[in-house]
């Protein structure tokens, strides 16, 4: 079935998942750019909590995408979660 033949709900789900992914990419970019500064100012614990929240959001979004058979988008959310977890693993807190 081509995209033109997809039911409207399917297209809306794709648009919603794509939009949520784009927002998640921007959020992760911000985390990546600001992580060193936040840790340097003593905010390592707060950064850890922020990243944990981000990972949970990405995993929930991944599940929703998978339920809608949006396998590519689900995989993209997995990649975002893994990138965030890599940042989290590198954070040294006192």
Image (tube, grey):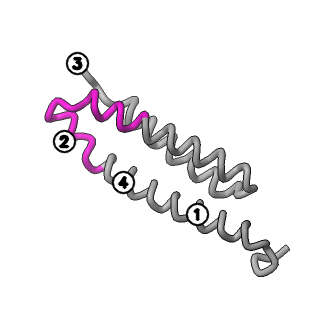
* Proximity of marks 1 and 4: CB atoms separated by less than 8 Å: no
The quarter holding residue 26 reads: bottom left
Q: Position of residue 83 (x, y in %)?
A: 46, 43
Where residue 41 sits, quadrant-wise, is top left
**Real-space Cα separation, disc 2 to disc 1, in angstroms:** 32 Å
- The foreground one among 16 and 75 is 16
- Give yes or no for contact between labels 3 and 4 (Cβ–Cβ under 8 Å): no
Q: Is residue 34 left or right of residue 52?
A: left
SS at circle 3 = loop
Q: Position of residue 28 (x, y in %)?
A: 39, 50
Residue closest to the far front: 9
Task: Identify the residue shown where x is 67% and y is 57%.
Answer: 72
Q: Earlier in the sequence, mark 1 or mark 4?
A: 1
Report, in whole angstroms, how far the alpha carbon at label 1 lies from the one at label 3: 39 Å
The reply, left or right, for residue 10 in relation to residue 18 is: right
How far is mark 2 from mark 3, CA to CA?
16 Å
Task: Report the Cα–Cα distance between label 3 and label 4.
Answer: 25 Å
Which label number is shown at residue 29? 4
Q: Tell me if label 4 and label 2 are in contact, CB under 8 Å.
A: no
Residue 40 located within the stretch drawn in magenta: yes
SS at circle 2: helix
Mark nearest the camera among 2 and 1 is 1
The part of the image, by quadrant, that contains residue 29 is bottom left
Q: Which residue is mark 2?
A: 37
- Label located before the other in sequence (1 or 3): 1
């Amino acid at each position: 079935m081509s995209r033109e033949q997809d039911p409207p709900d399917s297209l809306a789900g794709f648009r919603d998942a794509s939009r949520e992914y784009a927002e998640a990419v921007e959020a992760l970019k911000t985390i990546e750019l600001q992580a060193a500064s936040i840790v340097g100012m003593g905010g390592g614990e707060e950064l850890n909590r922020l990243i944990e929240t981000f990972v949970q959001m990405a995993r929930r979004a991944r599940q929703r995408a998978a339920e809608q058979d949006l396998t590519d988008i689900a995989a993209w959310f997995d990649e975002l979660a893994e990138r965030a977890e890599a940042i989290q693993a590198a954070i040294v807190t006192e």
